[in-house]
Amino acid sequence: MLNYKRYKSAPVVNFEERTWPEKQITKAPIWCSVDLRDGNQALIEPMVVEEKIEFFNLLVKLGFKEIEVGFPSASQIEFDFLRQLVDRKLIPDDVAVQVLVQCREHLIERTFEALEGVKSAIVHIYNSTSTLQRDVVFGMDREAIKEIAVNATKLVKEHAKSFPGKIILEYSPESFTGTELDFALDICTAVQDVWEPAPDNKIVFNLPSTVEMNTPNVYADQIEWMHTHFKNRDSIILSIHPHNDRGCGVASSELALLAGADRVEGTLFGNGERTGNVDILNIAYNMFSQGINPELEIENINEIIEVYERLCKIPVHVRHPYGGKLVFTAFSGSHQDAINKGVKAMHERKKEIWEVPYLPIDPADIGRKYDPIVRINSQSGKGGVAFIMESYFGFKLPKGMHKEFADVIQAISEKQGEVAPEQIMQEFKQNYLERKEPLHFRKCRFEDLAETDNPFDTLVTVTYTDNEVEKVFEATGNGPIDAVLRGLEKELGINIKILDYTEHALGEGSGAQAAAYIHLLDKDTGKTIFGVGISSNITRASIRAIFSGLNRLKKS
């Protein structure tokens, strides 16, 4: 049995004044990517300088205006990377690079050396403030911890005076979620008093869920408490930096935005320490799915995935929201049927608003294709097979035929697992289009008898083979199909009735082929079956469908 008694629940916030449950997200926050620092340090094989430059260029292309480029005072490769960005003039004028630095004098000095030539920079200082770290790591009381942050702020302010570019200060009380709220506010206020921000020169207070310790509503309460207790709130950018230890990073971020956060720090696909940082793309696509402009250029998720996987050497999980290979795929038969009907309704009604069951967004809007929406395995049903036949190959199977052909495919899937579209089409050919034994239609000739007294106005002459023996018959009927059927009944001694007939063009233009579907009933045995034929001539397609059905009846 799990030894759950070793653990205790994290404290919640007594904050009855909360207002975030009644709010909605209506706009995108300020996005800050920390892929090149927090994300990079969590890689088994960290990126080298040229890889980091390629990643930086991707982030710029995606529209990030704030990018944390590393910890330049911590290692030479981090320092060199920032210098390469500056020397090669790779930082756009509208992008602020962010650098992380501990609250130590020599590290702050080294950081400003690395920033030389940068037009706009966010200097991100931090120190741990949680009750646990104060006790077991630093052995310091509140005042000593606060003094570290205040002294570092003074040092940054002093260096900023002589720095030719713009310096924005960001302060993080690390392990904020494990810090008493009154102390978090006290230390932030002390930093604020030294920095002296203004509405046109704001300070960033970043309140990280360094370790996710509780449910997302508790984090939202903590954020709103700080949001409402900060002084001179109009001089502050309230930033969040959630991690995903409990698997709630996205939810925590979204609730924190409701609670007053202005800014989100995170990574692409959630790469980061332990279970990862919050996934910025997930939040952004969530906004997009609600009709909100995420203010990032994320229309081509496949390109983002390719660069991310190659540089981070981490695969995007197949079930990852929006990015996973299978997230727009349905194996369940009921899901497939609903998607099929939803897509058809969208086209028929010419709706501008996307509404399709099980597909919260149109995959094409983010660069995904319709092709993998439905995949066939033993759990699939008739709707999925019909969807594949129409979306891949243009065959609009009559509703009554869905189960008949789906049973053929399901028998295969139960033996081998997933059945690819190409194999489905091959089975369709073998079972319907190429079913030419024992009866094989060869050719026909029609004569219009409308001006005679004959009640049947069409005469047909049909050439066919029966077990490879060529035969010919003539017959009359009320149209070509009726005449052919009457002739076959007489020739073969059968008693057949047509229950249903449909047809449609395969493709567009004068050279397009036609597909014909005929549902036949053997009145002697009660068996019913479909036949399918294709031809550039719809009448010939119909006759081929009759022969296809008869051959299938003989086999059954």
Image (cartoon, rainbow, N blue to C red):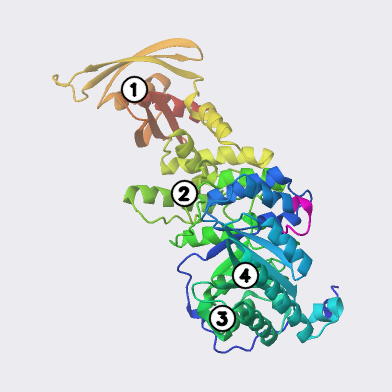
**Which span of residues is magenta-colored?**
71-78
Residue in the foreground of this view, choosing between 389 and 500: 389
12 horizontally vs 140: left or right: left
Q: Nearer the viewer, mark 1 or mark 4?
A: 4
Q: Are marks 3 and 1 in contact (CB under 8 Å)?
A: no
* CA gap, disc 1 and disc 4: 68 Å
The CA distance from mark 4 to mark 2 is 37 Å
163 w.r.t. 346: above or below:
below
Query: Looking at numbered disc 1 in the image, what kind of residue is underneath it?
Result: Gly
User: Mark 4–mark 2 contact, CB under 8 Å?
Assistant: no
Question: In the image, what residue occupies the spot 63% across and 83% down?
Answer: 189
Give the residue number, with chain letter if any, for mark 4. 169
Q: How would you rate the neighbour count of disc 3 (Cα within 10 Å): few for under 14, some for 14-19, many for 20 or more?
A: some
Q: Main secondary structure of the magenta part?
A: loop
Query: Which SS class for mark 3?
Result: helix
Q: Secondary structure at mark 4?
A: strand
The CA distance from mark 3 to mark 2 is 35 Å
Q: In the rendered structure, which disc, 3 or 1, sits on the residue that comes first in sequence?
A: 3
Query: Disc 3 marks which residue?
Result: 227
Q: Identify the residue under disc 1.
A: 511
- Where is residue 429? Give x, y as percent: 51, 27
- Mark in the foreground, 4 or 2: 4
Q: Earlier in the sequence, mark 3 or mark 2?
A: 3
Is residue 292 in the magenta section?
Answer: no
Name which of mark 1 and mark 4 comes first in the sequence: 4
Identify residue type, mark 4.
Answer: Leu
